[in-house]
Amino acid sequence: MLVVMSHNATKTDIDRVCDTIRSMGYTPAPMPGKQRTTVGLVGNDGAVDDSLVADLPGVAQIIHVSNPYKQVSREWKPENTVVTIASGVSFGGEEIPIIAGPCSIESERQIVESARAVRAAGAVALRGGAYKPRSSPYSFQGLGRKGLEFLATARRETGLAIVTEAMDEDGAHQVAEVADCLQIGARNMQNYSLLKTVGRIGKPVLLKRGMAATIQDLLLSAEYVLSEGNPHVILCERGLRSFDSTARNLFDLTAIPIVHQLSHLPIIADPSHGTGRRDKILPMSRAAIAAGADGVIIEVHPQPEQALSDGAQSLNPEQFTEVMRALRRVAEAVDRQLAGAVAEVA
Ligand code: PEP
Ligand code: MN
């Protein structure tokens, strides 16, 4: 439920609404706006009786939020949320940041080389996992703490913002020491204790859609982070499991305009995991931007054929440079632009 106060409501009126919401057993969330304050009611799991609040002085209107997710919904907040992870790297505004880098951090040399290459092509953030959620326990699991140190070196060398995955609560605190944005992977989208932990840490979160999650599941997972007081959530479409084995996943680009309709949070696209195929990154990242994506995350490796994970879907630096050229043109065609200075390599 949202209580919209009239533009001339006083602080006493607002405090009275908050106290009444508390007396009903819920938590008030006052949101001052340019014209008027809105007080959200948090903590209900179903319809709320508004009779105690509706007639209080200064109350202009009561809006019942019809979705099970509240704080992430457009009803709750009509204007887009812009999530800034580092200076000049904002998701949800006019500019479209591109995040790029290897699936996993494999060595200091590999991540620094990757960082230099993606920066030269125009990426503004570096991706790379130190903790890897692999389907097999015998596959490379990531370098852990050492990987985070190498990421910090890559940032010092290039100035790129850092996006990297946290897989558990301990890991989230470690990752938060280095990362500008904590990635929650598809396999952990419904790890509710991890979602609460990153909600409490408060740093920006990149929340990937689970491989069998509905859009409502994704938004409810984001709600966990917001309900802990962290509004800095970027959603990510990364493809769904399907019956068709031609591509690794079914890349659901419809999710982008649907999320924009239902939520004020930014949503980016991951064509690397979405398709699993290097040759499909160019068309599907173009399509993602055309569909309104607020960013794209792309796997790039200096030598994809030697990658310890996801080599088949990783671009080499030259291929990534080509993709960036194409994305600049598509962004312009939809009246947006890629974030960051244009670092064209002739
Ligand atoms: C990744 O980004 O490398 C990754 C493991 O992604 P996802 O969680 O989408 O599978
Ligand atoms: Mn990967």
Image: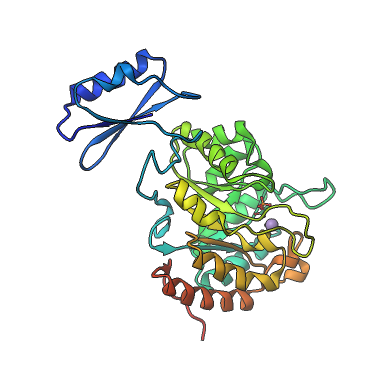
Q: Position of residue 140 (x, y in %)?
A: 78, 52
Residue 312 vertical placement versus 134 (above, below): below
Residue lying furthest left: 8
Given residues 20 and 50, the one toward you in this image is: 50
Given residues 319 and 306, the one toward you in this image is: 319
Given residues 39 and 298, the one toward you in this image is: 39
- Residue 76 is left or right of residue 320, and the answer is left
- Residue 19 is left or right of residue 89, and the answer is left
- Residue 301 is left or right of residue 244, and the answer is left
Q: How is the image coloured?
A: rainbow
Q: Position of residue 232 (x, y in %)?
A: 45, 44
Look at the image and tell me whether residue 302 can be seen: no
Instruction: Tell me the residue at 60%/73% (across/down).
Output: 320
Residue 194 vertical placement versus 214 (above, below): above
Residue lying furthest top: 23
Q: Position of residue 97 (x, y in %)?
A: 47, 62
Look at the image and tell me whether residue 242 can be seen: yes
- Residue 58 is left or right of residue 236, and the answer is left
Query: Splitting the image into 4 quarters, where does residue 245 fall?
Result: bottom right
The quadrant of the image that shows the N terminus is top left
Residue 61 vertical placement versus 135 (above, below): above
Q: Position of residue 261 (x, y in %)?
A: 45, 50
So how many labels did they put on this image? 0
Given residues 227 and 305, the one toward you in this image is: 227
Instruction: Tell me the residue at 72%/63% (across/down).
Output: 276
Instruction: Tell me the residue at 57%/38% (across/down).
Output: 173
Residue lying furthest right: 138
